[in-house]
């Protein structure tokens, strides 16, 4: 069997390490508090559970240690921290084995009580050390330091009074990277051998080479990864973390296209009217503000299951939100207007909707217009035309609209201009004319129109 394949499988299994290690943490602390209760209450009836807790703390610690070894093969970690984490984990495993054996063979001895309590206390101390190094590996070496808490609390927000005088990298680009990328690409944790905590490290790239192709954002690995659908395995930031906003992506792309410089100001890079309008959104410190998602009630699992049976994938947008990512991926030919109407049951929760290549008609637009929190809408390669397209004006939160491969005309582009927060439109292979696009760009420079097959 292929060695690389086996390595990939072992690393995949190792990814369960952060999940599994919570088991011995809970068991060891439970064992510790049990001993405290026994000590103060003299309730000897509780001692019967010691042997079971000792056994499971040993088994789960050894299993977590094994998964840790598998995960370490992935690389990208600070070697010194990793070594400390491994050695402290080995010590903890040894202590849990000793606790179990002491309980198994010496429970009737006179010295047992003091020895057992001492070993349990030692396990808690070792567990704290292991956890410290584990947290440092995952979030950075100073993650658990009091100085880091103080620095974060007292850190001054970057305020940009005049966007033309802002230093592009330090005041626009680096704050975006610090907020969305640093947790996985820092001195203590270098996923893919990549650090992004300084200009020099970003230019240097990772184990697979440079992540920037200066002067060409569309061919830069960084932009390819942040533009991937969040559900894809290689998407950055990874699933479960806050993705870059559309504005943030455009700032990074413009910086790369303009030469990816370190010290130049906005005015020196001579942004056009469209880019300058985008950059002005970052004045007064808005660059480090995260987009706030609408708050909605959770949909019952029964309702989600009923709709899913119609042939559509429904996934939570994130762990922190009840918003949904709804996509018709399989059996597209069987999806029609009637099935679109069934989504009304969850209309307030739909944030992303993908109905490309389905058999919907313009009648579905009336239904979609009621999805008040819809932010991203994919309708490409459908039979949609201009009819009822004006319904989309109701979608005040819509930012991304993909209608390429449809038969819409300039008339629909006029409608799109009235969608309040629209930021990006994909319209290639439609009947919209170049003249209409040019007029639109002059009138609405903050909206990006994609007219070719390359997604930027």
Image (tube, grey):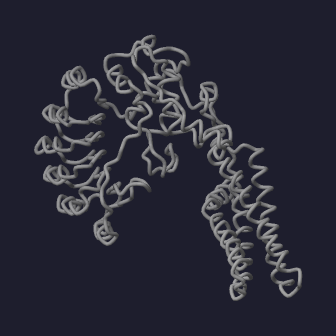
What is the number of callouts on the image? 0
Q: Which residue is drawn at 59% across and 42% down?
A: 149
> What is the quadrant of residue 340 in the picture?
bottom left
312 or 141: nearer the viewer:
141
Residue farthest to the right?
A: 110
Where is residue 26 drawn, in percent x and y?
64, 68
Residue farthest to the left?
A: 387
Where is residue 141 drawn, in percent x and y?
68, 42
Where is residue 20 drawn, in percent x and y?
63, 65
Q: In this view, does 216 lie above or below 403?
A: above
Where is residue 428 drawn, in percent x and y?
28, 34
Q: Is residue 279 left or right of residue 201?
A: left
Q: Is residue 327 above or below residue 79?
A: below
Q: Residue at x 57, y 32 (%)?
A: 211
217 or 153: nearer the viewer:
153
Q: Is residue 187 above or below residue 28?
A: above
Q: Residue at x 32, y 56 (%)?
A: 326
Q: Is residue 34 left or right of residue 428?
A: right
Q: Quadrant of the C terminus?
A: top left
Q: Quadrant of the N terminus?
A: bottom right
Q: Is residue 325 above or below residue 445?
A: below
Q: In this view, does 250 lie to the left or right of 153?
A: left
> What is the quadrant of residue 263 in the picture?
top right
């Amino acid at each position: 069997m292929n060695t690389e394949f086996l390595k990939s499988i072992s690393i995949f299994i190792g990814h369960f390490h952060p999940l599994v290690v919570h088991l011995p943490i809970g068991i060891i602390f439970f064992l510790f508090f049990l001993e405290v209760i026994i000590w103060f209450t003299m309730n000897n009836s509780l001692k019967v559970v010691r042997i079971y807790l000792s056994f499971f703390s040993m088994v789960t610690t050894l299993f977590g240690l094994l998964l840790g070894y598998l995960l370490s093969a992935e690389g990208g970690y600070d070697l010194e921290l990793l070594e400390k984490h491994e050695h402290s984990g080995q010590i903890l495993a040894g202590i849990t084995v000793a606790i179990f054996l002491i309980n198994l063979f010496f429970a009737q001895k006179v010295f047992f009580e003091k020895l057992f309590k001492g070993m349990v206390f030692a396990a808690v101390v070792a567990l704290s050390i292991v956890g410290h190094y584990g947290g440092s590996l995952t979030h950075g070496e100073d993650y658990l330091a009091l100085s880091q808490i103080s620095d974060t609390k007292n850190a001054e927000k970057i305020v940009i009074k005049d966007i033309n005088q802002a230093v592009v990298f330090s005041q626009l680009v680096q704050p975006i990277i610090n907020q969305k990328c640093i947790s996985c690409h820092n001195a203590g944790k270098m996923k893919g051998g990549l650090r992004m905590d300084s200009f020099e490290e970003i230019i240097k790239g990772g184990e697979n080479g440079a992540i920037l192709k200066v002067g060409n954002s569309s061919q830069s690995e960084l932009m390819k990864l942040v533009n991937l659908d969040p559900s894809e395995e290689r998407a950055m930031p990874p699933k479960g973390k806050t993705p870059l906003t559309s504005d943030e992506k455009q700032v990074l792309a413009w910086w790369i296209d303009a030469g990816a410089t370190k010290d130049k100001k906005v005015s020196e890079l001579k942004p056009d009217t469209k880019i300058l309008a985008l950059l002005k959104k970052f004045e007064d410190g808005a660059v480090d503000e995260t987009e706030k998602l609408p708050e909605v009630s959770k949909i019952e699992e029964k309702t989600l299951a009923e709709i899913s049976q119609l042939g559509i994938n429904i996934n939570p947008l994130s762990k922190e939100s009840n918003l949904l990512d709804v996509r018709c991926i399989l059996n597209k030919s069987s999806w029609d207007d009637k099935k679109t109407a069934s989504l009304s049951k969850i209309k307030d929760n739909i944030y992303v909707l993908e109905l490309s290549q389905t058999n919907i008609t313009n009648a579905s637009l009336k239904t979609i217009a009621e999805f008040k929190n819809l932010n991203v809408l994919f309708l490409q390669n459908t039979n949609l035309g201009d009819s009822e397209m004006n319904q989309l004006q109701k979608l005040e939160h819509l930012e991304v609209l993909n209608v390429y491969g449809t038969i819409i005309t300039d008339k629909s582009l006029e409608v799109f201009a009235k969608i309040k927060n629209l930021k990006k439109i994909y319209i290639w292979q439609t009947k919209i004319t170049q003249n209409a696009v040019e007029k639109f760009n002059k009138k609405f420079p903050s909206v990006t129109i994609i007219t070719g097959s390359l997604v930027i």
